[in-house]
Image (tube, rainbow, N blue to C red):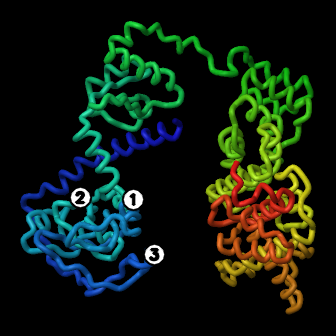
């Protein structure tokens, strides 16, 4: 529901922006005394295009001829294109292009006009559709190339304040949705506001549309099929929004209205607010719960913080990660009382630790899986699956966490501790763990591309030198060759260690590693243990957890086992 409301709000904001540009578009296209520009743009005979290989279904860059203009067509030099579901279907051979159209995929684009046919009615008649004009277009195909020809009736001028990248995403998805919703659906509109007087004033001036009004109000639309859609509003008015929806239902369905009672939403309190007071935090502090944790529990759980506090005082009083007030007690409480079923629920939807600090979330993950596994009764295979899924989710945070949580070096002890915490039991032998670490780095190093130039390396070397030596700021020191070589080696070791934590290897490389592991340690089920989650890339600790789980519970990774 949260993502739906955010998406609808974004839709309304975009609509208001689009409406604000209508006058600009009219001004750009209404130019009766316009004098056409000369066609002096040189168009090459060949261009680069992304072509689908009919045999392998893979995309590749090829050189092809620039398309020739046909009747009432315009040639566009493409600046940006977009990806659509139809492109993916066409690439897989399931959605052939219209007869006579380009076999190059791409259904929308943005760019500039470089040429047009002599029989065009619109092109060359206004500054919005002349040589060099910024346009976006809906295409039958050909968007994944440098040039494309399109009917002039499919062109839309691009306002100056919209970039090519944004414009390229408008024609197919947005305009199709707008057409279906407003041209064919023709919904009835019910406008509501948390301020009735303000709503009445705004009804007198429907053209006064701005971001401020959109954030205050919500809109309920009734389609011909009877579907009610609500959009807009804000989090602080969600109860009013729900009440307004039910009021509309009662209005359009008199039978339901006659059987309904008065709305009780104003007297229904939120969970945790029934007996909460400002003294809750102080009460928790008097029971020896640290101040920052007491304040966190009071503001997040209300009067339910006493339940979390009891859990904290009884057994689960350790922090999930240093620097944040989240404790083991919250994991137990959310698992038992708030229907948290996965580690992602805890790290992203309850504590928000994943959004605050990716490294902290990865550090806390083994402990979270151990606690939740004990509450929900997960077996080893389920623990492995949750670890894989959560690590894959955390990689989407797009944050590189270097020099954090003491992981600049990946020791054997730390790796064993991660594995044993996730599996809540004994790990595999030290020899096997070290083998996986070494082979993982061998495969990972094949994928690493050094994107640091020599100057960056020198700066890093100087930083390490400053850390390792006491240097007088006023004294000039020449680093001899041997010392510089030692610093370079230290820098490389640090880089490798960080890449090992941040990086992954591909599924095919994981398969090769699993085969080597099975040959040396005599356990071929480790291949199933690594592959059963279906992920396309895995990190070091995901591989270690899978191998250790297979070593300790082989029967759970039989090919015919399901959970």
Q: Earlier in the sequence, mark 3 or mark 2?
A: 3
Q: Which badge, 3 or 1, comes first in the chain's sequence?
A: 3
Are circles 1 and 2 on residues that touch, CB within 8 Å?
A: no
In the image: residue 467, left or right of residue 8: right
Local crowd size for mark 1, using a 10 Å CA cut-off: few (<14), some (14–19), many (≥20): few
* Number of numbered labels in the structure image: 3
- Residues at marks 3 and 1, CA–CA distance in whole angstroms: 16 Å
* Residue corresponding to mark 2: 156
* Left or right: 292 as drawn, with respect to 259: right
Pointer 1 or 2: first along the chain: 1
Disc marking residue 115 = none
| Residue 408: image location, x then y, percent | 82, 66
**Residue 343 falls in which quadrant of the image?**
top right
In percent of the image, x 80 and y 35: which residue is there?
Answer: 332
Residue 234 in the image, given as x and y percentages of width and height? 49, 31
Please tell me which residue is depicted at 37% across the width and 15% down the height of the picture: 250
- Residue linked to disc 3: 58
Dot 1: element = helix
Do the residues under discs 3 and 2 have CB atoms within 8 angstroms?
Answer: no
Q: Is residue 419 above or below residue 333?
A: below
Q: Is residue 323 above or below residue 258?
A: below
């Amino acid at each position: 529901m949260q993502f739906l409301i955010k998406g609808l709000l974004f839709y309304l904001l975009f609509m208001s922006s689009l409406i604000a540009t209508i006058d600009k578009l009219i001004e750009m296209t209404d130019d009766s005394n316009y004098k056409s520009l000369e066609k002096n743009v040189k168009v090459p005979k060949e261009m680069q295009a992304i072509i689908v290989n009919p045999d392998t279904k893979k995309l590749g860059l090829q050189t092809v001829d620039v398309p020739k203009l046909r009747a009432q067509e315009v040639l566009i030099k493409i600046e940006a294109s977009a990806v659509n579901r139809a492109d993916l279907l066409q690439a897989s051979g399931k959605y052939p292009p219209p007869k006579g159209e380009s076999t190059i995929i791409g259904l929308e684009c943005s760019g500039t006009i470089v040429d047009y046919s002599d029989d065009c009615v619109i092109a060359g008649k206004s500054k919005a559709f002349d040589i060099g004009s910024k346009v976006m277009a809906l295409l039958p195909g050909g968007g994944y190339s440098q040039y494309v020809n399109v009917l002039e009736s499919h062109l839309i001028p691009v306002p100056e304040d919209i970039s090519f990248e944004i414009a390229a995403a408008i024609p197919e998805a947005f305009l199709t949705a707008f057409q279906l919703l407003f041209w064919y659906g023709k919904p009835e509109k019910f406008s509501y506001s948390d301020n009735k007087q303000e709503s009445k004033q705004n009804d007198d001036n429907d053209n006064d549309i701005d971001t401020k009004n959109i954030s205050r109000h919500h809109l309920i639309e009734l389609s011909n099929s009877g579907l009610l859609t609500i959009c807009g509003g804000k989090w602080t008015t969600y109860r009013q929004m729900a009440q307004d929806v039910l009021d509309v239902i009662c209005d359009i369905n008199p039978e339901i209205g006659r059987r309904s009672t008065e709305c009780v939403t104003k007297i229904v309190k939120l969970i945790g607010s029934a007996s909460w007071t400002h003294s809750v935090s102080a009460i928790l502090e008097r029971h020896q719960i640290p101040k920052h944790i007491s304040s966190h529990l009071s503001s997040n759980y209300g009067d339910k913080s006493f339940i979390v506090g009891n859990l904290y005082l009884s057994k689960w009083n350790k922090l999930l990660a240093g620097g944040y007030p989240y404790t083991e007690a919250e994991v137990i409480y959310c698992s038992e009382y708030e229907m948290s079923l996965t580690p992602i629920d805890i790290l992203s939807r309850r504590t928000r630790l994943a959004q605050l600090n990716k490294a902290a979330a990865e550090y806390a993950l083994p402990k979270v899986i151990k606690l939740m596994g004990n509450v929900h009764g997960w077996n080893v295979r389920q623990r492995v699956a949750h670890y894989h899924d959560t690590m894959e989710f955390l990689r989407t945070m797009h944050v590189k966490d270097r020099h954090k949580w003491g992981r600049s070096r990946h020791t054997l002890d730390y790796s064993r501790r991660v594995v044993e915490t996730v599996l809540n039991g004994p790990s595999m032998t030290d020899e096997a763990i070290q083998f996986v670490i070494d082979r993982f780095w061998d495969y990972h190093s094949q994928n690493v591309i050094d994107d640091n130039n020599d100057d960056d390396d020198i700066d890093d070397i100087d930083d390490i030198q400053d850390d390792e030596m006491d240097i007088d700021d006023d004294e000039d020191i020449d680093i001899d060759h041997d010392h510089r070589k030692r610093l370079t080696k230290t820098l490389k070791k640090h880089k490798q260690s960080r890449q090992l934590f941040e990086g992954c290897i591909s599924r095919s490389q994981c398969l090769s590693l699993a085969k080597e592991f099975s040959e040396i340690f005599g356990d071929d089920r480790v291949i199933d243990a690594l592959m059963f989650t279906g992920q396309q890339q895995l990190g070091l600790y995901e591989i270690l957890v899978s191998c250790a789980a297979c070593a300790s519970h082989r029967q759970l990774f039989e090919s015919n086992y399901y959970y």
